[in-house]
Image (cartoon, grey):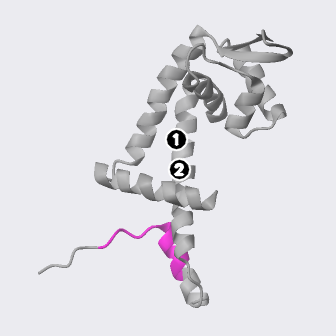
Amino acid sequence: MNARPGPRKDAVDAIIEQWAAVRPDLDTAAMEVFGRINRISRAVGDRQEKTYGRFGISRGEFDVLATLRRSGEPYTLSPRQLSATLMLTTGGMTGRLDKLERAGLLRRSPDPHDRRGLQVSLTDEGLRLVDEAVGAGLAVQTEALSALNSEQVGQLADLLRELLAGAA
């Protein structure tokens, strides 16, 4: 009877083996998990950045457009709401809004309920672009998960949800 081969070795395994050789007293289980999470995030993030670049936007700019899109009609939020959702400073948000407004993907207008405030809204072009870009970005993520079956993807999502809840 043939033994089933184990998972392929990866770069994280090599790091763990090096630590085991010089510090066998360390429990490196967390390093194995977070090393892989970080590498996956970086690899998929880089692919998404290239994908969004085809639409003339960065990942951060996509996040602004996607947040407006997810808010539902009329696809309008205040800069403060956007900053809070995206965990950005108001200064960081202003730069993104400036670029997206110059590109005609969103518009800023006075808030009718607060004379001191502004509203940020998707333009028709911004709506069209974000709807295309979200599909392309999801395709990148789906491709990254293609080594897993649907049950494994569900299990991974559940485990990561638990991990995130414990880390927050």
Task: Give the percent coordinates (x, y) of residue 165.
Answer: 57, 56
Q: Which sits in the foreground, 106 or 154?
A: 154
Mark 2: which amino acid? Answer: Ala
In the rendered view, tell whether residue 154 sits above or below residue 114: below
In magenta segment, residue 124: no
> Can residue 38 be seen in this snapshot?
no
Q: Quadrant of residue 27?
A: bottom right
Q: Please report the residue visible at 61 percent of the width from the left and 17 percent of the height from the top.
A: 75
Q: Which mark is residue 47?
A: 1
Q: Which sits in the foreground, 85 or 22?
A: 85
Q: Please report the residue visible at 36 percent of the width from the left and 68 percent of the height from the top.
A: 8
Crowding near the residue tagged with mark 1, few <14, some 14–19, many ≥20 C-alpha atoms within 10 Å? some
Which quadrant is the N terminus positioned in?
bottom left
Helix, strand or loop at label 1? It is: helix
In the rendered view, tell whether residue 98 sits above or below residue 15: above
In the rendered view, tell whether residue 103 sits above or below residue 138: above
In the image as oriented, which residue stretches furthest toward the front? 113
Which quadrant is the C terminus positioned in?
bottom right
Mark 1–mark 2 contact, CB under 8 Å?
yes
Q: Is residue 75 left or right of residue 84?
A: left
Mark 1: which amino acid? Answer: Arg
Task: Give the percent coordinates (x, y) of residue 68.
Answer: 62, 23
Crowding near the residue tagged with mark 2, few <14, some 14–19, many ≥20 C-alpha atoms within 10 Å? few
In magenta segment, residue 7: yes
Start-end of magenta stretch: 6-17
Task: Give the percent coordinates (x, y) of residue 150.
Answer: 30, 48
Q: Please report the residue visible at 50 percent of the width from the left and 75 percent of the height from the top.
A: 14
Q: Which residue is mark 2?
A: 43
Q: Which sits in the foreground, 50 or 150?
A: 150
Q: Is residue 69 left or right of residue 143?
A: right
Q: Quadrant of residue 106?
A: top right
CA distance separating discs 1 and 2: 6 Å
